Amino acid sequence: MFKHGGFEINNLKRHILESYYYCDIYDPNHIKNPCLNLISPYNETYFMQQALLEAEKAFSLNEVPVGAVVVCNNQIIGKGHNLTETLNDITAHAEMQAITAAATFLGGKYLKGCTLFVTLEPCPMCAGALYWSQIEKVVFATRDEKRGACRQQPSLFHPSTLVTNGILEAPCSEILKRFFKDKR
């Protein structure tokens, strides 16, 4: 028997507890790591929820409600929301704010190995900034049918950047519809 927290447990339970307590998620031999069988709370849905929180901040400031976060190794290293009206700056898009914050965090201009989560498809200006940052992946929730960068051919994103969409599309679309409905 083995004592843990005042309770006696058998060897099998001890083995399970030890595998949870002594695992290292940064283990380069992670295939052997028992912790990888656990569900990580840090997935694409979680990070898009964080971007949606940024969009809600923009909404509360009477800005177009778009939010963005940049993630590296499951850590948010940059975040932002639209501030174009507040700063009286047409370039103050959520993506630009998040890119700048992430580059500052990393101490360099390239975001290789990073992922941007944004509630609305980036515009051509933001796609250009993402191109130059050489970001690894862009995940957006809802399409911008009028001004989205994905409508452009050839692609405005860096050739090595993976672009996906659709995560939390409904709530991200809803906040935009609510904002523009209130404006009309």
Image: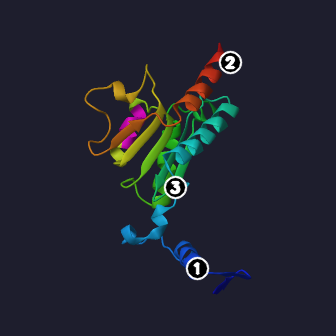
**How crowded is the residue under tag 1: few (<14 C-alpha within 10 Å), some, or many (20+)?**
some
Mark found first going from the N terminus, 1 or 2: 1
Answer left or right for 125 relative to 161.
right
**Which of the labelled discs sits on residue 106, or is there none?**
none
Q: Which residue is labeled 1 in the image?
A: 14
Residue 11 in magenta? no
Quadrant showing the N terminus: bottom right
What is the three-letter code of the residue carrying label 1? Arg
| Residue 184 x/y as whole percent | 65, 12
The mark lying in front, picked from 1 and 2, is 1
Q: Which residue is labeled 2 in the image?
A: 182
The mark lying in front, picked from 1 and 3, is 1
> Considering depth in this image, is 45 or 70 the residue closer to the camera?
45
Visible residue check, residue 45:
yes
Mark found first going from the N terminus, 2 or 3: 3
Q: Within the image, what quadrant is residue 176 found in?
A: top right
Whether residue 26 is situated above or below residue 168 in the rendered picture: below
**How crowded is the residue under tag 3: few (<14 C-alpha within 10 Å), some, or many (20+)?**
some
Q: Which residue is labeled 3 in the image?
A: 77
Measure the alpha-carbon separation of dots 2 and 3.
Answer: 33 Å
Whether residue 123 is situated above or below residue 37 in the rendered picture: above
Main secondary structure along the magenta-highlighted residues: helix
Which type of secondary structure does the marked residue at label 1 adopt?
helix
Magenta-colored span = 125-130
Q: Do the residues labelled 1 and 2 touch (CB within 8 Å)?
A: no
What is the three-letter code of the residue carrying label 2? Asp
Which type of secondary structure does the marked residue at label 2 adopt?
helix
What is the three-letter code of the residue carrying label 3? Ile
| Residue 85 x/y as whole percent | 61, 30
Q: Within the image, what quadrant is residue 7 found in?
A: bottom right
Mark found first going from the N terminus, 1 or 3: 1
